Image: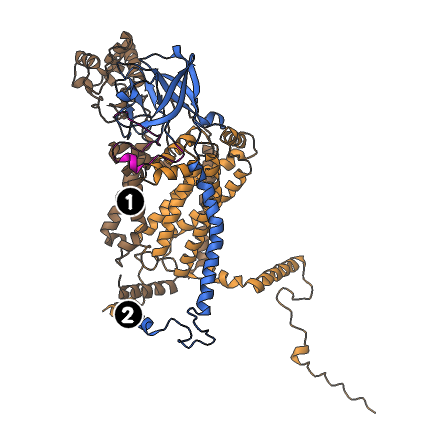
Chain colours: A blue, B orange, C brown
Amino acid sequence: MADKHLKHRSKYTLDRQIPGAFEGETITRRRFMTGTAHTAGAIAATAFTLPALGFAIGPIFKSTPHHWEAVGATGMFSDTNYVPVVLTVSPNIGEAGKTTVYVRKFNPEIDTDPYDKGTPYIAISSRCAHLGCPVRWVDAAERFICPCHGGVYDLLGRRVGGPPVRPLDRFYTRVSGENVEVGPRFSVNSELRRFSPRDPGEPVDGIGQYLYPSRPGAQKL
Amino acid sequence: MPRLPKLPAPPLPPPLREPPPRPGQANGKGGPIEEAMEAGITVVDWIDERTSLSGAGRWLLFRKVPKGTNWFYTLGSATMFAFLSQAVTGVFLAMYYRPDASGGAYESIRYVTNEVFLGQFVRGMHKWGSSVMVILVFLHMGRTFFFGAYKYPRELNWVIGVVLLILTMVMSFTGYLLPFDQRAYWATVVGVNINGTGPLLGPYLSDFLRGGSEFGATTLSRFYAIHMLLLPGAIAALIGAHLYLVAKLGTTAPPWQKPVPRSEELHEAEV
Amino acid sequence: MNQQQKEQYLREYSVLKAQGKPFFPYAVAKDSIMACIVMAVIIAMSLVLGAELGSKANPTTTTYVPRPEWYFFFLFEVLRVIKPPSLVPLATIGVPTIGMILLFLLPFYDRKPERRPERRPIATITGIAVIAAMAYLTYQGANAGSPTAIETPTPTAVVQAGGATRGEFEAGKQVVAQSGCLACHKIGENGNAGPGPNLSHIASRLPRQGIARTLVNPTAPMPSFKNLPPKKFQSIVNFLSQLK
């Protein structure tokens, strides 16, 4: 019915007999003022919302420079057992920015996966790949055990039980002089293929790597 | 000439008469108590003349609650009272708190707990008040659910109530990072990562909450700002809307309560 | 509810309201008394339970057992119960979101005019079931132990034997707890249910030698414990062969 009504109406205000209409005018002054009020209000509201929003989500896009940290002399680490070392991942907040990393020398008998070739040391993160609880290395069982929701990982950090969605994250390592240095973190899928670091709970197998994209700020080495 | 008896003066026309004493002014000057009451009445009158708040007050307070209203109907106001208690104790805790992840946060809470006069008491009230508020919110919702009070015409109020329930849970979640002890830290790590497991948007949401890809210097201040500025404002505004709708639509009667005297008449109307 | 039912409700409600009492002071008096009770409870809890402050946040810990505040235990337990990794997003985001959406939309899919709980059996039973499930999950979550502690009571046979047997049993309990067995096995109320079998009554299924053999030569994915010091190995076998 509304359409029918519109059909009969001319778009010129003059034709619609509106008092004070000008030749060729298509919008009434009332409609123009209503539109102005809405637009001006929207611009004013956006003017404080957008900067605030950008301010809040800005840090997502900030990329952090890679940083390498010496964690101990090369002689400290064996190729059959892990040694926990403390690493700074978030500078300027003291103790709260550190994390524990389990380090072991590369062992060609255990680390048979092609992706590990050329890695001098295996450094495994202590953050559970389920939701980030602190896993502990239990030497007797040769397992990483998570105290929260029952995640269990084997010697290489691959999941053996519980809900974790991918193996434990790892860190790049290199030898500099006498020292072992640990660099940025990366995630691995169940075949130990490397991916840019993800948060716990985000699978990287199959479609998972696209459903949980890596962040603009986090780059692979 | 004999003096004529003096005639009584004619009564003054009403506009010239002295106004009759107002209540409280009975004998010209009253005692100090009467004067104080008078001053109070004057102030209230002055405000009411300029705001017309007395109408709103009458509307809010002297509306009727239906027959059969019982103690179950106090759960909502009890929840609001717990919120007020949280707001007040929270303001005073904020006077001592420093959202500083490098040690200041924990130190300031330790200081409040151990050194400040009544510090442990006020912090305890805030901490346990959150538990009490969560319980009361759930009880209030349970009452509304089992009494069918979310049905017509109160659907919108139920929706607002669910938002308030969620905000209360988010409030308690953001609150317990602030002491920055072990439980606080790990619960936050897990909570933020739970947000990260949402496909596509999850990773960005957890980055937004942390203010970066790792738990960093701004994470604590983010949680602090959300906990003490964003959420209390939202909760207070929604409580206002919730209350307005309660007053406008009226509280429900218990579902078993039937209008007794006119029930037959109503049954006829049904047929 | 159709238009007629809506009008009927409004009519009945206006009668009930007309028969009611003013909000002030009758309902306000109850509200105020309730507010006093709420404050009394909060103050009593604050005085009795205090405000403990745990040890300072330490992201480098490998021994801390994180647990949430009690009112999140049910969510915590959901995360523990839903084991397959592919269902993790369901446990973390899916179940809570679905629950919230169902809660939000309740007045829009439950549109019948009936309000009495005994005449709304589906709603009432669902409500009670949800409350029971949340209570059960909260209870389970509250009792979820550490993966490196066993709280099973010592069997009466061992207690009666006393002396060295009991000492060995307690020592074995320690070793088993710290060797990570609970990661894959359940012993009493502790440990994870899977991938390994429940060990609470292992001795009634396997003889002593069988337990020792399995520990040395397990089926994958269980690791071999043959590299343990002999004393610790004996402790484990001792402990497990007492679990009848």
Inspect the image, locate mark 2, and give the three-letter code of the amino acid beneath it: Glu
Q: Residue at x 36, y 46 (%)?
A: B139
Does the stretch in magenta take in A210? yes
What chain does mark 1 sit on?
C
How dense is the environment of label 2, judged by Cα within 10 Å: few (below 14), some, or many (20 and up)? few
Pinpoint residue A58: horizontal percent, then vertical percent: 45, 39
Q: Label 1: few (<14), some or many (≥20) within 10 Å?
A: few
The residue singled out by tag 2 in the image is: B265
Q: Residue pushed farthest top?
A: C230
**Residues marked 1 and 2, same chain:** no
Q: State the extent of the magenta-drawn residues as a range.
A: A191-218
Q: Is residue A134 above or below residue B225?
A: above
Judge whether A20 appears above or below A156 on screen: below
Task: Please state, as top left, top right, bottom left or bottom right, where the N terminus of chain A lies in the image.
Answer: bottom left
Report which residue position mark 1 lands on.
C98
Mark nearest the camera among 1 and 2 is: 1
Q: Position of residue A55 (x, y in %)?
A: 47, 42
Give the side of residue A52 with respect to residue A3, left or right: right
Residue A30 occupies which quadrant of the picture?
bottom left
At 67% from the left edge and 62% from the top edge, which residue is drawn?
A: B30
